[in-house]
Image: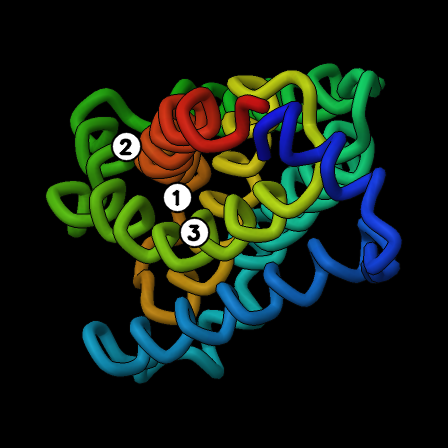
Amino acid sequence: MKTNDLIALLASDTLQPHPPVRQQLLQKLLLGAVVCAVLLFTLFGLNPRMDEMATHPAFATKMLWLAALMGFSLYGLFRLARPGMGAGHTLWGIGLALLAMFSLGLVQLLQTDAAARTVQWMGGSWQVCSTSIAALSLPVLAALLWALRQLAPTRAVLTGAVAGVLAGSMAASIYSLHCPETSLTFFAVWYVGGMALATGLGALLGGRWLRW
């Protein structure tokens, strides 16, 4: 939104109240997540061993980690969507969550026999994991940027990047319904790689679309 447009709207007698920031963001996040899930089931399908996978400790650890990333990034967007607001503790939270998974992955890798370490971090789907997560994040990122464009963020690049983290972690959690991997080292490398692509794209698009 341009500054002149904002002033014109504020001066207009017909200006209608908008839903709260949280409501707007959550509605668009839900919309993006539904599209992401439809794409997953259409293009990839559900892991046929999902019942077994859901009880695996690595799956539970991964989902808790992704939930933490989503929680911290959503908290950041609630703040950044308002003019003049900073990210608060968002970046610290995201950084600590990433550090936790990197640490768990490194410990697991070091505890693995040297001959099996390559399999531990590459798994059987390293060629498609990061790009799949990045691709699935696109509808979520688009929906979030759509919502943010109607709001008033003043730190466009940072807001776009945090939206990318949220989109990437949401896409990764949905992709987990297909992913056959159970290595924490794999998650620390390839899941983070996919989310990093979404974050970079979010920063780039945010810098272009969210500036006043």
Name the disc covering residue 121, or none: 2
Name the disc covering residue 142, or none: 3
CA separation, marks 3 and 1? Answer: 30 Å
Residue 99 in the image: state x and y as whole percent.
60, 18
Q: Secondary structure at mark 1?
A: loop
| Camera sees residue 151 | yes
Q: Nearer the viewer, residue 29 or 105?
A: 29
Q: Is residue 187 left or right of residue 54?
A: left
Residue drawn at 46 percent across, 64 percent down? 174
User: Which quadrant of the structure image shows residue 5?
Assistant: top right
Tag 3: residue type?
A: Ala
Circle 2 packing at 10 Å, graded few (<14), some (14-19), many (20+), is many
Circles 1 and 2 in contact, beta carbons < 8 Å: yes
Tag 1: residue type?
A: Ser
* Earlier residue among tags 1 and 2: 2
* Earlier residue among tags 3 and 1: 3
Name the disc covering residue 183, or none: 1
Tag 2: residue type?
A: Trp
Residue 166 in the image: state x and y as whole percent.
57, 43
Q: Nearer the viewer, residue 39 or 12?
A: 12
Quarter of the rendering occupied by the N terminus: top right
Q: Secondary structure at mark 2?
A: helix
